[in-house]
Image (cartoon, grey):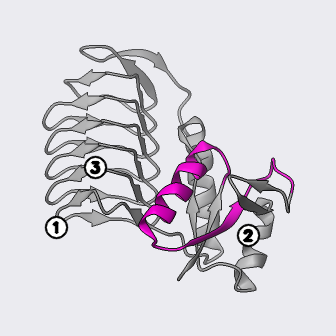
Amino acid sequence: MKKIALVGSTQLARRLIYYIQEVGCGQVIGMFDDFEKKGSKKYDHLILGKLNDIASLYQKGGFDEILVAIGYNNITFRKTIFSTLKEQSIPVGTFVHPSAYVADSVTIGEGCIVLINCIIEMNTVLHENIFLSSSCYVSHDVSIGAHTYCAPSLNIAGNSTIGEGCFLGINSTTVNGVRVGNNVITGAGSVIIKDVPADVLVAGVPALVKKEFLKNKD
């Protein structure tokens, strides 16, 4: 059985531990977290050390792959952690819960996590390090950019394009064929009926721009 480590020890890590144990797809050996004491326990699992301990433990054979358990409150950090792990040649795991329906023609990038009861239809592409929470519906011919975090019960209509580093709030919906730019946040229950520019917060029915963010230089 493969040995799995997690980055982060918040409630998201707790959920992943539960699902991994439920499915029986690996053994979670513990978590890395800069804000917890090495050797302590959380959710009955060991705090393995801080982030700068990851590479050393992997090289010693301490784990086989790692999952990024960093939530929507820090999308930029999710991206940074993933990129650092890749630079260090540490395998970032992909987890798809068996209750999810994923069409054969779907492409799922490294580091993606797809939770219970999601539906991903034909010809859709999930780029790297995407998180799909419970009961997300992604229709046909959709592209979701790397490092995007999707809250529960998201509905993305066919031929839509979602940018990188977005946070799509719970029950957000897009109509067919819209384009959402990079680093966009959608408020809970937003209904997106037209293209959304990068670096903004949108909310409402229909969704309107409520706030502009400083341009991301990455």
Residue in view at x 70 percent, y 57 percent: 44
Name which of mark 3 and mark 2 comes first in the sequence: 2
Q: Name the residue rendered at 27%, 65% in the picture.
A: 107
- Picture mark count: 3
Q: Residues within 10 Å of mark 3 (few under 14, many from 20)?
A: many
Magenta includes 150?
A: no
Q: Nearer the viewer, residue 116 or 88?
A: 116
Q: Secondary structure at mark 2?
A: helix
Residue 141 image position (x, y, % from top left) = 15, 53
> Which residue type carries mark 2?
Ile
> Would you name the residue on which mark 3 appears?
118
Residue 54 got which mark?
Answer: 2
* Residue 96 vertical placement versus 115 (above, below): below
**Residue 28 is covered by the magenta coloring:** yes
User: According to the image, label 1 marks what residue?
Assistant: 105
User: At label 1, which amino acid type do we have?
Assistant: Ser
The answer, for residue 62, to whether it is visible in the render is yes
Element type where label 1 sits in the image = loop
Tell me which amino acid carries mark 3: Cys
Q: Position of residue 30 (x, y in %)?
A: 69, 65
| Crowding at mark 2 (Cα within 10 Å: few <14, some 14-19, many 20+) | many
